[in-house]
Amino acid sequence: MDFDLTSEQELIRDTVRSFARERVAPVAEELDREARFPVELVREMAGLGLMGIPIDERYGGSGGDTVSYAIAIEELTRIDSSVAITVAAHTSLGTMPIYLFGSEEQKERWLPDLASGRRLAAFGLTEPDAGSDAGAARTTAELRDGTWVVNGSKMFITNAGTELTWGVTITARTGEDEISNLVVENGTPGYGISEPLHKLGWKASDTRELTFADCAVPDGNLLGPRGKGFHQFLEILDGGRISVAAMGVGLAQGAYDLAFAYAQERQQFGRPIGTFQAVAFKLADMAVEIEAGRQLVLKAAWLKDRGRPFALEAAMAKLYTGELSHRVVNQALQIHGGYGFMDEFPISRLYRDQKILEIGEGTNEVQRMVIAKHLGL
């Protein structure tokens, strides 16, 4: 076994780490406080080639592998989750359906702007009454004279309403027992985008409710064969879990970094609190769990890069890192004491940002269902 990163993967890690520390860290607290979408940072990341890492270069992407992509998401989340989820949702959920299931004409039409990061893409699966039970979606699309007429709504959709947003790929019922994927571009008549939703965390990311009222979508915007949407979005979610699992590792690492630094600086009873066993053992346990979680993520990414089955490992990684990030950030805030409860300290933002990692991209309960199914139970 070889656990070394390639020179290309190390370059991605170092580039994103420097960008996150030098450009994201100084403004993260302000963006969170103002719930302001980081347009300029997204444009800078586009310039660095970070908005389409796993997309082939001929479509405007960087041509990187999944391991490189996971590393980049981890490094961004280490500093700020809102910036990281903007990249992850755009890449894994917004752009990837077109890359995997689009026709060559659709790829050439849409991917250059998306993979380069000039525009952002969203993915509309969740509905007000269809969350974990995504197959219960009620949004419908009826083919009339070569046009899909869409009616329904989607909820908690990331990247749907920014000034950079191009459109959204949605799942819709195109028959009684049939789900298909359709691309709806911004500005399409009948397509409504709500004001930004107010959230506990990820405040600088864009989250909206979408509505479709006799929304007319061209037949050429059907993504892949009609009726294959359910299987397509399951495949998309498998890959997306790797990026969200990488976020779990990144947030845990960021919380550890803050707690470690504070434990060396904070003096109580005449010495740094990190010299007390109660604090030192907390940090030791954090380090162990973070390393275990990172290896789960990298293995899932490694399997995907080799074209081998990875759905089980992706679900394991997503479940484990979501829960480890909860444990780590909780102990990291405890080490900060009362100061950790103040918004002036970054650990408070990480604490709020963490919870969604146990809910989004499939709840912990859903991950256990997926894992149990793969185990044959």
Image (cartoon, rainbow, N blue to C red):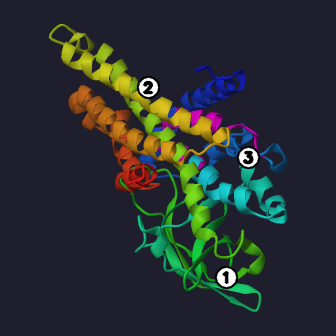
Marks 2 and 3 in Cβ contact (< 8 Å) = no
Which portion, as a residue range, is magenta? 61-87
Residue 168 in sight? yes
Q: Amino acid at mark 3?
A: Ile
Q: Which element carries disc 3, helix, strand or loop?
A: loop
Q: Amino acid at mark 2?
A: Glu
Name the spot of residue 283 as percent of width and height, x first.
Answer: 31, 21
The residue that label 1 is drawn on is 189
Query: Main SS type for the magenta part?
Result: helix
User: Closer to the camera, 248 or 39?
Assistant: 248
The earlier-in-sequence mark between 2 and 1 is 1
Which circle marks residue 55 in the picture? 3
Q: Is residue 253 left or right of residue 334?
A: right
Q: Residue at x 25, y 37 (%)?
A: 341
Residue wearing tag 2: 291
Q: CA distance from mark 1 to mark 3?
A: 30 Å
- Residue 65 part of the magenta segment: yes
Side of 360 relative to 323 (left or right)? right
The mark closer to the camera, 2 or 1, is 2
